[in-house]
Image: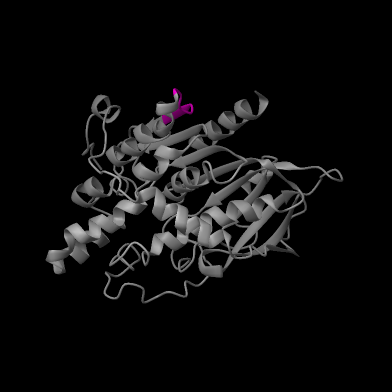
Amino acid sequence: MPLFDLPLDQLRNYSSTAVAPADFEDFWDRTIAEARGLPLDAVFEPVDNYLSVINTFDVTFSGFGGDRIKGWLHLPAQLDPGEQLPVVVEYIGYSGGRGLVNQNTRWAQAGYAHFIMDTRGQGYGGVSGDTPDPHPSAGGNSYAGLMTRGADHQDNYYFRRVYVDAFRAVEAAQSHPAVDPSKVVLAGVSQGGGITVAAAGLTAGRLDGVIAALPDVPFLQDFPRAIDITPRGPYPEIAGFLGRHREKYEPVLAVLNYFDGVHLGRAATVPALFSAAQMDDICPPSTVFASFNSYGTGLREQGGAPEKDMEVYRFNNHEGGQEHHWIKQLQFLRKLLSS
């Protein structure tokens, strides 16, 4: 894939044209308050993962509407009594789920508690999942996939449920006795990166303990540009829907505006390490830079903003930095936790 997006010097200064809805904060205050009004009821059941150095728990907790969400919690096997570890809460890419019990344990291998949230209604592509979405008809007509499910109104939109699940996943992870609730790191690739940005913004000022965010080639950023220029992946689902429902561009965009990471990440207060790939035709680099450049800027009014950095992979498509970037993430967290 050639370099099809803006040159790097323009990317570093690019800002989205999206403007947050007037009731954006009220919408999310109401949404989170409703969710937290229901019992979390996090349950951790030990399960055999066939590994000698990692212990795993099958997790169930209440997400949006009290719906039961699945997950895994992986812990290094050799823990001292009463020891608590920093936890990495990981969100999964589009179509994927939490996977098999021992499929992804790398953060636990690095010495962290590793909490993986299953994504409701997904797990049908790449990695299996175990959490249904009991709202399959929300919003009526939609394009194949999830991007326009419930896009008739912000209260019905699919990612409202997913973002609430992500918020409650942090609370679930914090509730385990082997987790240090004051040291929560949010992480994910693609859709998982977009959920990471959303969770960083939604927890800011609402939930203590989150200390960092690691959005890797994040999806769900800068919807107006993403819909217009993205040739491959989930964003074209929206264009496909609008190609048939020609009169719905403005109403659909108004709904998506409540879920754009450009707006959600603005409220974030914790350090972040982003990544972008310049040949990425699924999450174009301009959309990622729009999110990065907006991230944490809500604090500027108070005279400060969180530290943030961007790793750019010039010759990569949506795979991004992969194992090379994980080393960067490990270094980032090691420095953060030692300071």
Determine whether 223 is above or below 143 in the image. above
Q: Position of residue 34 (x, y in %)?
A: 51, 62
Q: Position of residue 284 (x, y in %)?
A: 29, 43
**Residue furthest left in the image:** 246
Q: Position of residue 253 (x, y in %)?
A: 24, 55
Please tell me how many numbered marks the rendered image carries.
Answer: 0
Q: Which portion, as a residue range, is magenta? A: 303-310
Q: Quadrant of the C terminus?
A: top right
Answer yes or no: is residue 104 visible: no
Residue 6 appears in which quarter of the rendering? top left
In this picture, residue 276 sits left or right of residue 324: left
Determine whether 294 is above or below 73 in the image. above
In this picture, residue 104 sits left or right of residue 134: right
Q: Position of residue 31 (x, y in %)?
A: 46, 58
Viewer-closest of 69 and 326: 69
At horizontal 63% and vertical 41% (from top left) the residue drawn is 209
